[in-house]
Image (tube, helix red, strand yellow):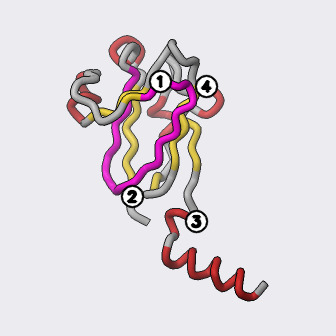
Amino acid sequence: MARAIDLLAIALIVFPSMVLATEYVVGDDEGWNSGVDYYAWLDGKTFYVGDVLVFNYNAGDHNVIVVDADGYDKCSASPNWGSYDSGNDVITLSSPRDNYYICQWHCDYTDQKLKVSVLQN
């Protein structure tokens, strides 16, 4: 038992982001959908390296495109750094930076986009 506690203590010191990672369901119960106020959803949340975003939506109705700041501002899916369309997409925040996500089909019309600023632990 003492060895397990020692290993947990070492893990907390060496790998804090892995041990203390938080999983966020984007939009909570409303999910990744048109008409959700993602600016309000972000309010009060702080994201760290190792945290996980879960995008839940009806596959075929939406998608998640990883874009840069320009793509976010212009609702442009090209170029992009990843495209997801499973309806239950899980993305781990891997580095301290701003991350940008849009729905290719609803960004322009319903502002379905998300900017997540990630901090180092």
Q: Mark 3 or mark 4, which has the lower sequence index? A: 3
**Horizontal placement of 120 versus 31: left or right?**
left
CA separation, marks 1 and 2?
A: 27 Å
Q: Mark 4 or mark 1, which has the lower sequence index? A: 4
Looking at the picture, how far across and down is residue 81, in whole percent? 29, 36
Q: Is residue 51 above or below residue 115?
A: below
Q: Going 49% across and 77% down the picture, which residue do you hit?
A: 14
Amino acid at the residue labelled 3: Val
Q: Mark 4 or mark 2, which has the lower sequence index? A: 4
Going by the picture, which residue comes out furthest to the bottom? 2
CB within 8 Å, label 3 to label 4: no
Q: Mark 1 or mark 2, which has the lower sequence index? A: 1
Going by the picture, which residue comes out furthest to the right? 1
Residue tagged 4? 30
| Boundaries of the magenta span | 84-103
Indicate whether residue 96 is drawn in magenta.
yes
Q: Nearer the viewer, mark 3 or mark 4?
A: 3
As helix, strand or loop, the secondary structure at mark 4 comes to helix
Check disc 2: other Cα within 10 Å, few if <14, some if 14-19, many if 20+. Answer: some
Looking at the picture, how far across and down is residue 121, in whole percent? 44, 66
Residue tagged 2? 119
Residue tagged 1? 85
